[in-house]
Image (tube, rainbow, N blue to C red):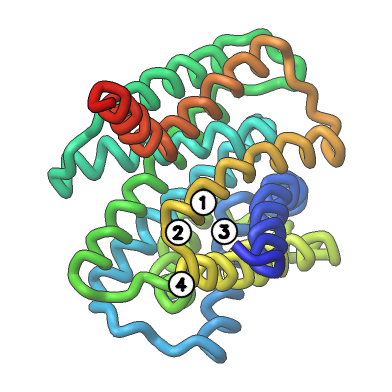
């Protein structure tokens, strides 16, 4: 990867890692579901001015929007609003890789390989350690559960994304932008039904520069700029070289949360974090390590 593209990768990691701090700031000023509606309204209105509508049937865009846009972010925003520390959320959310493996096997009939099983077991134990550890920064069971549910929804969205690609369509930035129209109605309906008119009206009356900055960051930086740069890297480099870069996102998320939100991590949580990260590394690199190990053994035996 060239120096320029390496710097672009660093920009993506920084944007997506800092994103969790921005969400924490946002839910202090807006109800989480209303904030989600505002994010995707901005993505849809601004993105459609510059991005051509993708040649993807509406039912697939709707499935993508309901799982990856509405499901993931409605649950994530609510999780942080209900007591999930932003730094830990950035890490726990990466369990989407494990849900992607399981759901791909169930829905797409993809085989689960040995390194993936090891990765799921290790990361699963790590999540259990995080969830049961003594808390330095208060973490609620509801917030933790909603974050796991958000990761599962992201995993389902990845399966939908893969199915779209398997059908010969291009799941790129155009899908992110135009599918936002399908995410807006459920966000609005859920916000009115769960958060209520009073909370929505109060946040509108008290809308300030922080609220605007949060929505701009979530829509323009985390969504449009982040996914634009990500699509660029995937176009110019193998997916196996680009995908593991997301492993650095929770590291940035944890550091940013410690710096900007004064969140503290206990020794038990650090142990769980290390187990989850190692599990994700095994999931990303385990198969190539296994092939290299087998190839090395065969070479020794032949000599």
The span from disc 3 to disc 1 (Cα, nearest Å) is: 7 Å
Tell which circle, 2 or 3, labels the residue nearer the N-terminal end. 3
Q: Are marks 3 and 1 in contact (CB under 8 Å)?
A: yes
Residue 69: give its label.
2
The span from disc 4 to disc 1 (Cα, nearest Å) is: 26 Å
- Measured as percent of width and height from the top left, residue 210 is found at 83, 60
Observer-side mark, 4 or 1, equals 4
Observer-side mark, 2 or 4, equals 4
What residue lies at 51% left-to-right and 51% top-to-bottom?
Answer: 73
- Measured as percent of width and height from the top left, residue 228 is found at 56, 73
Q: Are marks 2 and 4 in contact (CB under 8 Å)?
A: no
Q: Secondary structure at mark 4?
A: helix
- Measured as percent of width and height from the top left, residue 4 is found at 70, 69
Q: Secondary structure at mark 1?
A: helix
The span from disc 2 to disc 4 (Cα, nearest Å) is: 23 Å
Q: Label 4: how many residues lie within 10 Å, few (<14), some (14-19) or many (20+)?
A: few
Q: Is residue 116 visible?
A: no
């Amino acid at each position: 990867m060239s120096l320029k593209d390496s710097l672009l990768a660093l920009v993506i990691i920084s944007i997506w890692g800092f994103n969790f701090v921005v969400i924490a700031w946002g839910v202090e000023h807006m109800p989480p579901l209303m904030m989600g509606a505002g994010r995707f309204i901005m993505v849809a209105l601004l993105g459609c001015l510059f991005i051509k509508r993708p040649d993807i049937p509406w039912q697939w865009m709707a499935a993508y929007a309901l799982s990856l846009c509405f499901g993931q972010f409605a649950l994530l925003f609510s999780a942080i609003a209900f007591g999930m520390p932003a730094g830990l959320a950035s890490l726990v959310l990466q369990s989407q890789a494990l849900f992607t493996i399981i759901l791909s096997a169930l829905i797409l009939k993809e085989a689960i390989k040995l390194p993936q099983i090891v990765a799921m077991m290790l990361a699963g134990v790590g999540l259990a350690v995080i969830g049961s550890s003594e808390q330095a920064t208060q973490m609620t069971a509801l917030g933790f559960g909603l974050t796991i549910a958000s990761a599962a929804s992201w995993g389902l969205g990845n399966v939908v994304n893969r199915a779209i690609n398997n059908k010969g369509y291009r799941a790129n930035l155009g899908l992110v932008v135009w599918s936002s129209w399908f995410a807006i109605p459920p966000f609005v309906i859920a916000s009115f039904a769960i958060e209520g008119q009073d909370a929505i009206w109060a946040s509108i009356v008290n809308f300030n520069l922080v609220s605007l900055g949060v929505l701009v960051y979530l829509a323009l930086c985390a969504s449009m700029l982040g996914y634009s740069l990500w699509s660029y890297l995937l176009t110019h480099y193998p997916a196996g070289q680009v995908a593991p870069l997301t492993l650095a996102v929770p590291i940035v998320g944890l550091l940013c949360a410690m710096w900007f939100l004064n969140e503290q991590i206990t020794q038990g949580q650090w142990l769980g974090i290390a187990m989850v990260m190692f599990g994700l590394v095994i999931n990303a690199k385990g198969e190539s390590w296994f092939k290299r190990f087998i190839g090395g053994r065969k070479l020794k035996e032949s000599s």
